[in-house]
Amino acid sequence: MAGQGQERAGVSGSPLAFVISEQDRQTLDMVQAALAESRVRLAFQPVVLAQSPDRTAFWEGLVRVLDPKGRVIPARDFMPVIENTELGRLIDCAALGQALTTLARHSDVRLSVNMSARSIGYPRWMRILKKGLQTSPTIGERLILEITESSAILVPEVVTAFMDDLQREGIAFALDDFGAGYTAFRHFKDFFFDIIKIDGQFIRNIHRDPDNQVLTRALLSIARQFEMFCVAEAVETPEEAAFLQSIGMDCLQGYLFGAPSLRPAFLPEERRRRA
Protein backbone atom coordinates (compact mmCIF):
# COMPACT_ATOMS: atom_id res chain seq x y z
CA MET A 1 0.00 0.00 0.00
CA ALA A 2 2.79 2.39 0.89
CA GLY A 3 4.38 1.69 -2.46
CA GLN A 4 1.15 2.54 -4.27
CA GLY A 5 0.85 5.80 -2.37
CA GLN A 6 4.41 6.71 -3.22
CA GLU A 7 3.74 5.87 -6.88
CA ARG A 8 0.67 8.16 -7.01
CA ALA A 9 2.62 10.92 -5.27
CA GLY A 10 5.39 10.48 -7.80
CA VAL A 11 2.96 10.93 -10.70
CA SER A 12 1.23 14.00 -9.29
CA GLY A 13 4.58 15.53 -8.41
CA SER A 14 6.31 14.54 -11.64
CA PRO A 15 8.56 16.94 -13.54
CA LEU A 16 5.99 17.02 -16.37
CA ALA A 17 3.20 18.04 -14.00
CA PHE A 18 5.43 20.78 -12.57
CA VAL A 19 6.25 22.11 -16.06
CA ILE A 20 2.56 22.20 -17.04
CA SER A 21 1.63 23.92 -13.79
CA GLU A 22 4.42 26.47 -14.23
CA GLN A 23 3.40 27.16 -17.85
CA ASP A 24 -0.20 27.74 -16.76
CA ARG A 25 0.93 30.11 -14.03
CA GLN A 26 3.04 32.08 -16.51
CA THR A 27 0.08 32.26 -18.90
CA LEU A 28 -2.21 33.56 -16.15
CA ASP A 29 0.39 36.18 -15.18
CA MET A 30 0.85 37.22 -18.82
CA VAL A 31 -2.88 37.73 -19.42
CA GLN A 32 -3.36 39.53 -16.13
CA ALA A 33 -0.54 41.94 -16.99
CA ALA A 34 -1.90 42.48 -20.50
CA LEU A 35 -5.32 43.38 -19.09
CA ALA A 36 -3.81 45.72 -16.52
CA GLU A 37 -1.70 47.47 -19.17
CA SER A 38 -4.41 47.59 -21.88
CA ARG A 39 -2.54 45.23 -24.20
CA VAL A 40 -5.63 43.37 -25.40
CA ARG A 41 -6.68 43.86 -29.03
CA LEU A 42 -9.11 42.51 -31.61
CA ALA A 43 -7.74 41.09 -34.85
CA PHE A 44 -10.34 41.28 -37.61
CA GLN A 45 -10.96 38.57 -40.21
CA PRO A 46 -13.45 38.94 -43.07
CA VAL A 47 -16.36 36.56 -43.57
CA VAL A 48 -17.25 36.76 -47.26
CA LEU A 49 -20.33 35.86 -49.29
CA ALA A 50 -19.73 32.47 -50.89
CA GLN A 51 -21.18 33.45 -54.27
CA SER A 52 -19.51 36.90 -54.22
CA PRO A 53 -16.21 36.46 -52.35
CA ASP A 54 -15.21 40.05 -53.04
CA ARG A 55 -18.02 41.17 -50.72
CA THR A 56 -17.62 40.99 -46.93
CA ALA A 57 -20.77 39.91 -45.09
CA PHE A 58 -19.29 40.71 -41.69
CA TRP A 59 -16.00 40.70 -39.79
CA GLU A 60 -15.03 38.50 -36.87
CA GLY A 61 -13.12 40.20 -34.07
CA LEU A 62 -10.69 37.67 -32.58
CA VAL A 63 -9.17 38.55 -29.24
CA ARG A 64 -5.40 38.85 -29.06
CA VAL A 65 -2.92 39.69 -26.31
CA LEU A 66 0.21 41.72 -26.98
CA ASP A 67 3.33 40.86 -25.05
CA PRO A 68 5.44 43.73 -23.62
CA LYS A 69 7.39 43.91 -26.91
CA GLY A 70 4.19 44.22 -28.95
CA ARG A 71 4.20 40.69 -30.33
CA VAL A 72 0.72 39.29 -31.01
CA ILE A 73 -0.34 36.21 -29.02
CA PRO A 74 -3.41 34.38 -30.43
CA ALA A 75 -6.27 33.20 -28.22
CA ARG A 76 -5.39 29.52 -28.66
CA ASP A 77 -2.21 30.15 -26.66
CA PHE A 78 -4.01 31.44 -23.56
CA MET A 79 -7.79 30.83 -23.64
CA PRO A 80 -7.66 27.12 -22.67
CA VAL A 81 -5.82 28.12 -19.48
CA ILE A 82 -7.95 31.12 -18.49
CA GLU A 83 -11.41 30.19 -19.80
CA ASN A 84 -12.66 28.80 -16.48
CA THR A 85 -11.16 31.60 -14.41
CA GLU A 86 -12.04 35.21 -13.64
CA LEU A 87 -9.51 36.25 -16.28
CA GLY A 88 -11.63 34.50 -18.88
CA ARG A 89 -14.54 36.73 -17.97
CA LEU A 90 -12.34 39.84 -18.08
CA ILE A 91 -10.99 38.91 -21.52
CA ASP A 92 -14.60 38.55 -22.72
CA CYS A 93 -15.30 42.00 -21.30
CA ALA A 94 -12.30 43.52 -23.07
CA ALA A 95 -13.23 41.89 -26.38
CA LEU A 96 -16.85 43.02 -26.18
CA GLY A 97 -15.84 46.57 -25.25
CA GLN A 98 -13.53 46.84 -28.24
CA ALA A 99 -16.14 45.34 -30.57
CA LEU A 100 -18.76 47.86 -29.46
CA THR A 101 -16.29 50.74 -29.85
CA THR A 102 -15.49 49.55 -33.38
CA LEU A 103 -19.18 49.39 -34.27
CA ALA A 104 -19.74 52.89 -32.90
CA ARG A 105 -16.89 54.29 -35.02
CA HIS A 106 -17.78 52.43 -38.23
CA SER A 107 -21.49 52.55 -38.99
CA ASP A 108 -21.08 50.44 -42.15
CA VAL A 109 -19.39 47.50 -40.36
CA ARG A 110 -21.08 44.37 -39.01
CA LEU A 111 -18.98 42.53 -36.48
CA SER A 112 -18.98 39.26 -34.55
CA VAL A 113 -17.11 38.69 -31.31
CA ASN A 114 -16.61 35.55 -29.26
CA MET A 115 -17.90 35.02 -25.77
CA SER A 116 -18.09 32.12 -23.35
CA ALA A 117 -21.41 30.96 -21.99
CA ARG A 118 -19.70 31.36 -18.62
CA SER A 119 -19.86 35.15 -19.11
CA ILE A 120 -23.66 35.14 -19.27
CA GLY A 121 -24.87 36.99 -16.22
CA TYR A 122 -21.39 38.32 -15.44
CA PRO A 123 -22.29 41.84 -14.20
CA ARG A 124 -19.38 43.71 -15.78
CA TRP A 125 -19.93 42.08 -19.19
CA MET A 126 -23.63 42.98 -19.10
CA ARG A 127 -22.85 46.59 -18.13
CA ILE A 128 -20.46 46.93 -21.07
CA LEU A 129 -23.07 45.52 -23.44
CA LYS A 130 -25.90 47.77 -22.22
CA LYS A 131 -23.73 50.88 -22.33
CA GLY A 132 -22.49 50.04 -25.83
CA LEU A 133 -25.99 49.47 -27.16
CA GLN A 134 -26.99 52.93 -25.99
CA THR A 135 -24.28 54.56 -28.12
CA SER A 136 -26.19 54.14 -31.39
CA PRO A 137 -29.56 52.63 -32.34
CA THR A 138 -27.92 50.52 -35.07
CA ILE A 139 -25.25 48.83 -32.96
CA GLY A 140 -27.44 45.96 -31.78
CA GLU A 141 -28.40 44.93 -35.31
CA ARG A 142 -24.74 44.99 -36.39
CA LEU A 143 -23.44 42.92 -33.46
CA ILE A 144 -23.09 39.14 -33.62
CA LEU A 145 -22.19 37.18 -30.50
CA GLU A 146 -20.39 33.89 -31.15
CA ILE A 147 -20.67 31.06 -28.64
CA THR A 148 -18.78 27.82 -29.15
CA GLU A 149 -20.75 24.61 -29.31
CA SER A 150 -18.88 23.13 -26.34
CA SER A 151 -19.62 26.24 -24.26
CA ALA A 152 -23.30 26.46 -25.20
CA ILE A 153 -24.05 22.89 -24.18
CA LEU A 154 -22.75 23.45 -20.63
CA VAL A 155 -25.81 25.49 -19.64
CA PRO A 156 -28.33 25.20 -22.51
CA GLU A 157 -31.28 26.60 -20.58
CA VAL A 158 -29.30 29.67 -19.54
CA VAL A 159 -28.00 30.20 -23.09
CA THR A 160 -31.44 29.98 -24.69
CA ALA A 161 -32.96 32.48 -22.22
CA PHE A 162 -30.01 34.84 -22.71
CA MET A 163 -30.30 34.64 -26.49
CA ASP A 164 -34.03 35.26 -26.41
CA ASP A 165 -33.56 38.45 -24.39
CA LEU A 166 -30.82 39.89 -26.61
CA GLN A 167 -32.32 38.88 -29.94
CA ARG A 168 -35.15 41.25 -29.06
CA GLU A 169 -32.48 43.99 -29.11
CA GLY A 170 -31.60 42.98 -32.67
CA ILE A 171 -28.40 41.12 -31.70
CA ALA A 172 -27.65 37.99 -33.73
CA PHE A 173 -26.03 34.82 -32.38
CA ALA A 174 -23.61 32.44 -34.07
CA LEU A 175 -22.87 28.88 -33.00
CA ASP A 176 -19.11 28.64 -33.46
CA ASP A 177 -17.18 25.45 -34.32
CA PHE A 178 -20.37 23.56 -35.15
CA GLY A 179 -19.69 19.83 -35.31
CA ALA A 180 -16.67 19.97 -33.02
CA GLY A 181 -18.59 19.75 -29.75
CA TYR A 182 -21.37 17.66 -28.31
CA THR A 183 -24.59 19.58 -28.92
CA ALA A 184 -27.54 17.31 -28.26
CA PHE A 185 -30.22 17.85 -30.89
CA ARG A 186 -32.89 18.05 -28.19
CA HIS A 187 -31.15 21.26 -27.08
CA PHE A 188 -30.18 22.38 -30.57
CA LYS A 189 -33.83 22.73 -31.58
CA ASP A 190 -34.32 25.23 -28.76
CA PHE A 191 -31.25 27.41 -29.33
CA PHE A 192 -32.49 29.45 -32.33
CA PHE A 193 -29.04 30.52 -33.44
CA ASP A 194 -29.05 32.90 -36.40
CA ILE A 195 -25.75 31.65 -37.81
CA ILE A 196 -23.94 28.31 -37.74
CA LYS A 197 -20.19 28.20 -38.36
CA ILE A 198 -19.00 24.77 -39.47
CA ASP A 199 -15.77 23.74 -37.79
CA GLY A 200 -12.66 23.79 -39.98
CA GLN A 201 -11.91 20.08 -39.46
CA PHE A 202 -14.78 19.33 -41.87
CA ILE A 203 -13.64 21.90 -44.43
CA ARG A 204 -9.97 20.97 -44.92
CA ASN A 205 -9.42 19.22 -48.26
CA ILE A 206 -13.19 18.93 -48.69
CA HIS A 207 -12.85 18.92 -52.47
CA ARG A 208 -11.12 15.52 -52.28
CA ASP A 209 -12.34 14.08 -48.97
CA PRO A 210 -15.64 12.19 -49.40
CA ASP A 211 -16.15 11.90 -45.63
CA ASN A 212 -15.88 15.66 -45.13
CA GLN A 213 -18.20 16.22 -48.09
CA VAL A 214 -20.91 14.04 -46.54
CA LEU A 215 -20.51 15.56 -43.08
CA THR A 216 -20.51 19.15 -44.33
CA ARG A 217 -23.57 18.55 -46.49
CA ALA A 218 -25.31 17.11 -43.41
CA LEU A 219 -24.39 20.12 -41.26
CA LEU A 220 -25.50 22.48 -44.01
CA SER A 221 -28.80 20.59 -44.26
CA ILE A 222 -29.33 21.03 -40.51
CA ALA A 223 -28.73 24.77 -40.85
CA ARG A 224 -31.25 24.96 -43.70
CA GLN A 225 -33.86 23.01 -41.73
CA PHE A 226 -33.67 25.48 -38.87
CA GLU A 227 -33.42 28.55 -41.16
CA MET A 228 -29.90 29.38 -39.99
CA PHE A 229 -27.27 31.15 -42.07
CA CYS A 230 -24.26 28.86 -42.63
CA VAL A 231 -20.55 29.77 -42.64
CA ALA A 232 -17.66 27.45 -43.51
CA GLU A 233 -14.59 28.14 -41.38
CA ALA A 234 -10.88 27.63 -42.20
CA VAL A 235 -11.18 27.87 -45.98
CA GLU A 236 -7.62 27.98 -47.28
CA THR A 237 -7.59 26.92 -50.95
CA PRO A 238 -9.53 27.86 -54.11
CA GLU A 239 -10.49 24.20 -54.51
CA GLU A 240 -12.13 24.11 -51.07
CA ALA A 241 -13.95 27.36 -51.81
CA ALA A 242 -15.20 26.10 -55.19
CA PHE A 243 -16.68 22.94 -53.66
CA LEU A 244 -18.37 24.91 -50.86
CA GLN A 245 -19.84 27.30 -53.43
CA SER A 246 -21.17 24.35 -55.42
CA ILE A 247 -23.15 22.95 -52.46
CA GLY A 248 -24.72 26.30 -51.61
CA MET A 249 -22.71 27.45 -48.58
CA ASP A 250 -23.77 30.97 -47.55
CA CYS A 251 -20.43 32.40 -46.39
CA LEU A 252 -16.76 31.49 -46.28
CA GLN A 253 -14.07 32.44 -43.77
CA GLY A 254 -10.39 31.61 -43.80
CA TYR A 255 -6.90 32.59 -44.85
CA LEU A 256 -7.86 32.37 -48.52
CA PHE A 257 -9.84 35.57 -48.01
CA GLY A 258 -7.74 37.22 -45.34
CA ALA A 259 -5.81 36.50 -42.16
CA PRO A 260 -6.91 38.07 -38.86
CA SER A 261 -5.41 41.55 -38.80
CA LEU A 262 -5.06 44.40 -36.34
CA ARG A 263 -5.25 46.65 -39.44
CA PRO A 264 -8.50 45.64 -41.19
CA ALA A 265 -9.47 47.04 -44.56
CA PHE A 266 -12.36 49.06 -43.12
CA LEU A 267 -9.92 51.32 -41.24
CA PRO A 268 -8.80 54.45 -43.07
CA GLU A 269 -5.35 53.97 -44.60
CA GLU A 270 -3.60 56.34 -42.20
CA ARG A 271 -5.04 54.52 -39.19
CA ARG A 272 -3.99 51.14 -40.61
CA ARG A 273 -0.41 52.46 -40.74
CA ARG A 274 -0.57 53.61 -37.13
CA ALA A 275 -2.29 50.47 -35.77
Image (cartoon, helix red, strand yellow):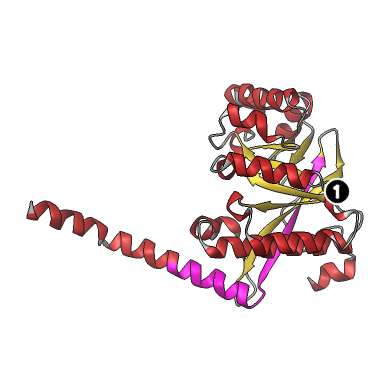
Tally the numbered discs. Answer: 1
**In front of the other: 206 or 229:** 229
Residue 161 appearing in the image: yes
Residue underneath mark 1: 141
Q: Camera-side residue: 131 or 104?
A: 131
> What x and y, as percent, mark residue 57?
84, 44
Magenta highlight range? 25-48
Name the residue type under label 1: Glu
- The residue shown at (76%, 39%) is 252
Q: Is residue 127 left or right of residue 142?
A: left
Q: Is residue 178 above or below residue 247?
A: below
| Residue displayed at 61% across by 52% down | 116
Q: How far from the left and from the top, in percent, is residue 81?
A: 49, 59
Residue nearest the viewer, comparing 265 with 158: 158
| Position of residue 169 in the picture relative to residue 261 (left or right) | right
Specify few, some or many for label 1: CA neighbours under 10 Å numbering under 14, 14-19, or 20 or more.
Answer: some
Residue 175 locus on image (x, y percent): 67, 40
Q: Quadrant of residue 99?
A: bottom right
